[in-house]
Image (cartoon, grey):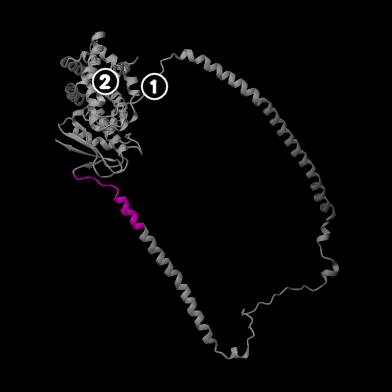
Amino acid sequence: MDFLSKIKNTITTKTVENLATFLGENTANVESGIGLCLNSFMAGILKYGHSDVEIKNIINVLNDGGHTGDILNNIESFSSNFEKTQLLVTIGNNISSHFLANKVQLLVEKISEISEIRKTSASSLLSLSAPIVLGFIGKTMKENNFDLVGLRNHFKEINEPIINSLPPAINNIFQFKKTVNTPVPGNLQSSPVVNKEKTKSKVNFLVILPWLILGIAGLSVLYFAKFAKKETTDIPVATISEKPQDDLIPEDFLPDSSVANLPVEKNIVPIPSEVKPEPIQKPADEVKKSPETTQKPSVAEVKKELSKPAEKKETTSLVNNTKETPTIKNSASEIKTPAGWTAINGTAFKKNSAEISNSTMINGIISQLKNSNKNINISPLSSGNRTLAEDRAYALREMLIEKGISEDQINVSKSVSGSNPNGIVYRISN
């Protein structure tokens, strides 16, 4: 049985019913919520204890608070008493604030959504899980005589199953990377895989071989049929082309004596000086009319028709100009930085992802915070994808920690109104 299952087994059905009465919630929802809270707080302890200094701090809290595991034997009786339960909530609230810091509010919101309980109930369950988890860790250290090195190795053993059991929404808060390792030796599995591949190749070859033979036979038939057609078509062409060459003699191209004595005729085509259309016969009444009156209206109409396309081109160009102007205004209105906050210049994240693709955009922030007493407050923007904005805010926080900025200098606050390509803003203060 893994570490997390052992902790959950200490929570009896009667304890869950008592907590549901204390919170005024559905029993099934409270059972789901306490399981998520135990898992989340233990994941927070593993995230906190990433070095020997933090593990030493955990041991000091266990010793100073008297977390030896005695509470595990009295959870049911504590949960039946309202005042004792409220006392545990108060103690656990201080513990969770110490180890989880600014992640408490985010965890409460996600646990409330997943378990379908109120946020106040989720906060109380998270606070109750803190002394339970620390009591179990203290009991494990006492039974196994763990020192700092022993507790560090124990955390490494239970790290993977606890992280893999986290829901994606809660894992996103801690930014854990889930890994699935199979400790089965490779030598035991390599031989049957090779044998399967060999059998598959034999079966496939036996199936393909008849079709391969048929394909070769078909191609050979087509090739010989095509070659035979070429031989038959070449023979008549050769006989036809040779006959006129045998019959033709050079003298055949010379003129006859009778034709040679005839005068040379020249083909002269008369070229008219002016090409005029043939006149159309009209009645006598129409001939009397003056030609000037009939031709003037046609010239005016031609001018009007020539002027119409130009006007259409001008109007279309004006329409095109009016269509282009709104797009410029819309692109400028997409960036809205709230007052008192600063946006990251350029695009620092991959599209639709919280992964930082351009760390040079953050170098200016690092230079201001490093070796100084300044603090940074990071806030996601409310417009657009709020979940992605929250993920990017915590991704920026993790990047700053990796670059050597202390966790105490960094705070991720609630979302503010505004919009920009990165979805986050920040504020640096002394």
Residue at x 34% of width, y 20% of height = 161
Residue at x 22% of width, y 17% of height = 77
- Residue type highlighted by circle 2: Thr
- Residue type highlighted by circle 1: Val
The reply to whether the C-beta atoms of the residues labelled 1 and 2 are less than 8 Å apart is: no
Q: Which residue is mark 2?
A: 15
Q: Foreground: 36 or 350?
A: 36
Q: Quadrant of residue 285?
A: bottom right
Left or right relative to 111: residue 259: right
Residue at x 26% of width, y 20% of height = 15
Quadrant where the C terminus is found in the figure: top left
Q: Quadrant of residue 217?
A: top right
Q: CA distance from mark 1 to mark 2?
A: 34 Å
Q: Which residue is mark 1?
A: 180
Left or right relative to 421: residue 211: right
Q: Which region shows up in magenta?
A: 324-339
**Residue 19: x, y in percent?**
25, 24
Q: Foreground: 380 or 107?
A: 107
